[in-house]
Image: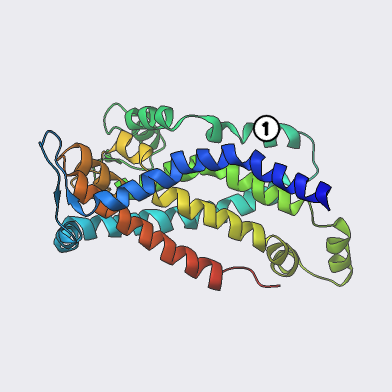
Amino acid sequence: MRLYVRKERTSYILMIPILLLIIVIFAYPVIRTFILSFFKISFGASETRYVGLANFKNIIRNQTYWQALTNSLYWTFGNLLVQLSIPLFIAILLNKRIRGINFARAIIMIPWIVPAVTIAVCMRWMLLPKIGIINEMLDSMNIMKKQIHFLGHRFTVMPTLILLNSWKFLPFGTLMILAALQTIPAETYEAAEVDGASGFQKFRYITLPLVGSMIWFVGFLAFSWNFNTFDLIWLTTQGGPGTRTQTLSILIYRTAFKTFRLGEASAISVTVAILLIIIGVFYFKYLTPKE
């Protein structure tokens, strides 16, 4: 009994460094942001003034906040639509046992390892209307005769950014779903073929149910990451044209470091945290795969 207590005490002692790291990196910034949301703070000001819920009232009354929230939801669910459908079919193709499949599985990781800064800078030049290679290729193939400013037009900018962001995410989702596909016994598909099941029926009644938990997990990660995406949007459009791609992450940055209203920026961050908690609870309670 003493040996068991000693081992348990040692395990708790060994957890102290990681707990301290979590507190310093995660817990303290969250608590500090929550506290700052009740104060009026301006860079360069001599004092900080407590204003209660005034910051929250200001952002709720501001139409820019609601536009950013709409853009964030559009951005997030647009990415989810692409990032949960295409990786599934790519993973099914990569699950085949054919020559060169290992090489294909290796090169598909390239978008994932390329830094977002590189993607943003390169694609910003490639998508330009007159000197960009994308417009040049479309014109040479007679697909489009008119030059398109993909990142400068209000109807094309958000779908273009969604495709760029999804291109970078595809390898992660594909490999996760591929790992789940490889756990399905081949005998399951053979038995279905004996029963006369078609390819679509095997996908619907075998593949989709058995990898459903992995798709759910990938969807949860994709939602969390996409909702808080900042780097790709800021490096390509900085929230433009106008406020067409200004998500809540971009609005927080602009409010804090462009207009120097740190209290309002903290209040926006708190509303984002509350919204994500509500959506997360709903996701885990109602969308979790059941046995």
Res. 155 in view: no
- Residue marked by disc 1: 106
**Does residue 7 appear to the left or right of 35 in the view shown?**
right
As displayed, is residue 53 above or below residue 18? below
Q: Position of residue 243 (x, y in %)?
A: 21, 49
As displayed, is residue 181 above or below residue 145? below
Q: Position of residue 142 (x, y in %)?
A: 38, 39
Q: Nearer the viewer, residue 262 or 223?
A: 262
Residue drawn at point x = 12 percent, y = 40 percent = 47
Q: Position of residue 218 (x, y in %)?
A: 58, 53
**Does residue 9 appear to the left or right of 32 in the view shown?**
right
Res. 260 in view: yes
**Does residue 251 appear to the left or right of 285 in the view shown?**
left
The amino acid beneath tag 1 is Ala
Q: Nearer the viewer, residue 99 or 237?
A: 237
Residue drawn at point x = 62 percent, y = 54 percent = 88
Label 1 residue SS? helix
Q: Count of labels shown?
A: 1
As displayed, is residue 141 above or below residue 91? above
Q: Position of residue 41 (x, y in %)?
A: 16, 44
Residue drawn at point x = 40 percent, y = 52 percent = 227
Q: Nearer the viewer, residue 196 or 189?
A: 189
**Does residue 195 appear to the left or right of 166 in the view shown?**
right
As displayed, is residue 278 above or below residue 16? below
